[in-house]
Image (cartoon, helix red, strand yellow):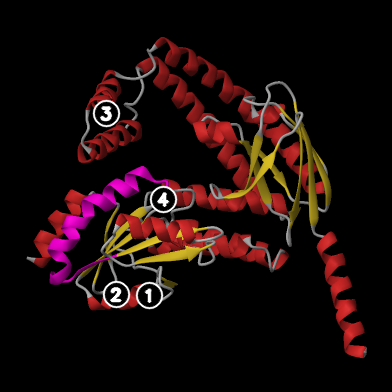
Amino acid sequence: MKSYITILIMIFLASCASKERQCILDGKIVGEKKETLLLFKASKFPNIEAEIPISDSVFSHTIDFSYPEAYELIFKDEFESGSMTVTSFFSEKGTVKFVLKPRGRPYDNKIIGGPINSELNNYTALLRTMFWDEVMKYSDSLRILMDNGTALSDETNEVLEQLRETKSDSVRGLLYNELKYLENTGKKYAPKANKYTQIQDSIQNLRKLWEFNYIEKNTSILSYYKFMVSIKETAKSCCWQPVDIELTNKAQSNLDRYIRAFPKHPYNEIIQNTINGLLNIHSGGRFIDFNLPDIEGQNISLSTIVKENKLTLLDFWSTWCGPCLRTNKELIPIYEQYREKGFEILGVTHVYGKPDSLISFIQNHNYPWPNVIDFDGKNGLWDKYNLSNQAGGLFLINASGQIVGVNLTAAKIKETLEEILN
């Protein structure tokens, strides 16, 4: 009898604890009629947490959470089109109310509920006054040039025309690289548009400095979230190049401060993984080991595969990543040619929720190399390899564990194999 009462008490306490960790979203849509909102955790975008139906321009949803985190709402049709407005908010105990305007700007939307969201509103208003209004002025000018067809340089228009005409995946990959080169060298836009982008960049640099100081001077959930965004942007922009050790030391110092303030927050591991990726994942760096199950449930260790082969290609990919799938298709004959000479590929993908469709996808594509799955992103591999918010990436690793190539084309991989294995 006593044990039965104990169980009832535990159930009651668990129920109370659950209620204390519920965030109720209560919103209405103003203007354009919409059918569905997508809910994302900001730290796991673009993995969808929930689809929220909209009925008579109102919606409601409940989030069960352990720690306050940043979430994002995006209208489903806008997300699928790629042209979208993101509404950010934090999960807080109680009700968070929304008034959303489709296809508007983020600051057109209203979010009311909880002290963290109040801090977020003040932060956003300050950014708008100091930076965003000025940035948008030049964005509007750029949009006019784009509508007139005078924004892009002749070189960019020529590459885009070739992209429209080609049917070759390999040529398409080279052309995308050419577009990236034009963007990185300031040759993407015509002179007038280029002037606008340079002014925007200077304003954005001032914003980043202001946000850096905000992160340094504050220790709140909001500043912690901004720190996570900042370190992920650094990882993305470094393009797998060695990073200044002073920067990573400063990042580690900030992280240690936040861990002391929020010892069990999920951002701790995400940011630590990203810092480790900045330190290690680049040409000349060393791979980060992991042990994950394949589609049959058998665990595979990356370090074991690296030791057993002369060259290992670590292939991160997603089912929705067209370039990843095209590259995988190009890699099949290369793999068949060199697998007996000391070349191995280890595919890595991830899935949230039930894995059935992913396993069927892998089987239907007949990849001849092993593929492992990071279920629900629990191993944080996308953060460890600086792939946050990206669909995939390729890392060529030699037998001693050194990364000798990052995001090489299939043709360049074959060329490297010919040099080393023949």
Counting from the top left corner in percent of width and height, residue 45 is at: 55, 48
Q: Earlier in the sequence, mark 1 or mark 2?
A: 1
Q: Amino acid at mark 2?
A: Ile
Residue 328 shown left or right of residue 320 in the figure: left
Q: Range of the magenta residues?
A: 320-345
Indicate the quadrant where residue 123 lies. Answer: top right
Amino acid at pointer 4: Thr
- Classify residue 411 as left or right of residue 202: left
Whole-number angstrom distance, CA of label 1 to CA of label 2 = 8 Å
- Location of mark 2 (residue): 305
User: Which label belongs to residue 319?
Assistant: 4
Can residue 352 be seen?
A: yes
Q: Give how far apart the Cα atoms at labels 2 and 4 are.
A: 24 Å
C-alpha separation, residue under disc 1 versus residue under disc 3: 39 Å
Write down the quadrant of residue 360 in the picture.
Answer: bottom left
Of all residues, the one furthest to the top in this rendering is: 148
Residue 38 higher or lower than 405, as above or below: above
Query: Is residue 185 magenta-colored?
Result: no
Local crowd at mark 2 within 10 Å, few (<14), some, or many (≥20)?
some
| Residue wearing tag 3 | 163
Q: Magenta stretch: residue 336 in it? A: yes
Q: Nearer the viewer, mark 2 or mark 4?
A: 4
| Label placed on residue 300 | 1
Q: Which residue sits at x=26%, y=63%?
A: 368
Q: Nearer the viewer, mark 3 or mark 4?
A: 4
